[in-house]
Image (cartoon, rainbow, N blue to C red):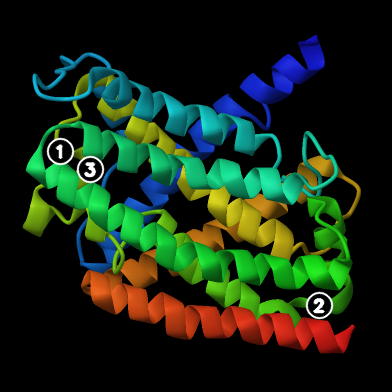
């Protein structure tokens, strides 16, 4: 690994940058929810303090768990997101770009959910097992709508390269891509495990579901992965559906990108604040009927407009 690739993977736009921005956007999300509920909310350093605190807590491995799977799950989730962070464009361009990188990125962004499923199922805890079952069911429901919304852009651009999809989206404008963007946003809400789709970890029903037996460093890695996902998924949405003007000044384009991501986090927070948790059957119906319908509409509009 050369020094340049090493820097991109570990510093910018890779692990360090994605982790810091993820924790900052997690703070923004928590602060917005607090203000919506007439509370003060946490200080800006709170998410960083929570993460660091977990690394000084005892890590307990349940006696009845599959130890290899239980310990490997958080590492798999974090590793997949580190790899994804160098493929998602920031400020108009990604650190790495190659043929069909869209397919690779889709797999990488699915792995954190698979890791949670493995971790919950291997924990030996009945709440973890129920959460893993719900996670698997939810995963099968939202991934189809997500893939179709992205394929609509891919067919329009005639390519599976993320850079080509960005240029196509910028050329046709945001209105034509809006149904696909809404479908992506709703699927993103489920991938993040936020209301109304926090079914696999429903604290008032199954403790913390897939997270129930995790503690210490392993829980810290899972929480960090979720924070990174809160930055990477909105970044992916912004890059593909709302690429906007690229001035050529990378710093300005990056700041503009981060501002757009903040707007997406605001929308996500509003959805969380005004919606109750859905039952798993309601979530399945929602994704297979309404979200898939929006994705199909986007596919049809783009297919016949270009």
Q: Identify the disc placed on residue 212.
A: 1
Residue shown at 76% from the left, 11% from the top: 1
Up the image or down, 125 lies above or below 267; here it is above
**Residue 299 horizontal/vertical position (percent):** 71, 80
Task: Find the distance from the CA under tag 1 to the CA under tag 2.
Answer: 44 Å
Give the class, few, some or many, for how many residues have Cα within 10 Å of label 1's Cα (few <14, many ≥20). Answer: many
Q: Position of residue 139 (x, y in %)?
A: 40, 58
Q: Nearer the viewer, mark 3 or mark 2?
A: 3
Residue hosting label 3 = 210
Mark 3 or mark 2, earlier in chain: 2
- Badge 3 element: helix
Tell me residue 151's x, y (percent): 71, 67
Is disc 2 placed on a helix, strand or loop? loop
CB-based contact (under 8 Å), mark 3 and mark 2? no
| Residue found 80% across the figure and 17% down from its top | 4
Image point 88% across, 65% down: which residue?
158
Dot 2 corresponds to which residue? Answer: 173
Residue 77 location (% of width, % of height):
44, 33
Tell me: 27 left or right of 211. Answer: right
Q: Is residue 66 above or below residue 196?
A: above
Q: Is residue 163 left or right of residue 74?
A: right
Quarter of the image for residue 182 reads bottom right
């Amino acid at each position: 690994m050369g020094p340049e690739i090493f820097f991109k993977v570990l510093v910018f736009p890779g692990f360090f940058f994605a982790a810091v921005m993820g924790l900052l956007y997690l703070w923004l999300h928590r602060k917005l929810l607090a203000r919506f509920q007439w509370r003060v909310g946490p200080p800006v350093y709170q998410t960083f303090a929570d993460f660091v605190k977990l690394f000084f807590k005892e890590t307990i491995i349940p006696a009845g768990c599959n130890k290899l799977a239980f310990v490997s799950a958080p590492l798999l989730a974090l590793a997949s997101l580190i790899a994804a962070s160098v493929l998602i464009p920031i400020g108009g361009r990604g650190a790495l770009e190659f043929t069909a990188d869209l397919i690779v990125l889709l797999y990488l962004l699915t792995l954190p959910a698979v890791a949670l499923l493995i971790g919950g199922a291997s924990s030996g805890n009945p709440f973890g097992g129920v959460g893993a079952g719900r996670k698997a069911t939810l995963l099968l429901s939202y991934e189809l709508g997500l893939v179709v919304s992205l394929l609509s852009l891919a067919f329009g651009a005639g390519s599976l390269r993320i850079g080509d999809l960005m240029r196509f989206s910028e050329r046709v404008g945001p209105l034509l891509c809006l149904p696909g963007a809404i479908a992506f946003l709703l699927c993103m809400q489920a991938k993040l495990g936020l209301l109304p789709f926090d079914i696999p970890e429903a604290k008032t029903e199954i403790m913390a579901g897939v997270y129930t037996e995790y503690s210490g460093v392993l829980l810290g890695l899972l929480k960090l992965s979720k924070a990174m996902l809160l930055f990477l998924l909105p970044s992916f949405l912004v890059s593909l559906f709302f690429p906007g003007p690229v001035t050529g000044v990378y710093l300005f384009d990056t700041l503009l990108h981060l501002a757009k991501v903040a707007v997406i986090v605001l929308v996500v927070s509003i959805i969380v604040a005004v919606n109750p948790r859905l039952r798993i059957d309601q979530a399945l119906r929602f994704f297979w009927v309404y979200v898939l319908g929006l994705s199909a509409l986007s596919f049809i509009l783009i297919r016949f407009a270009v």
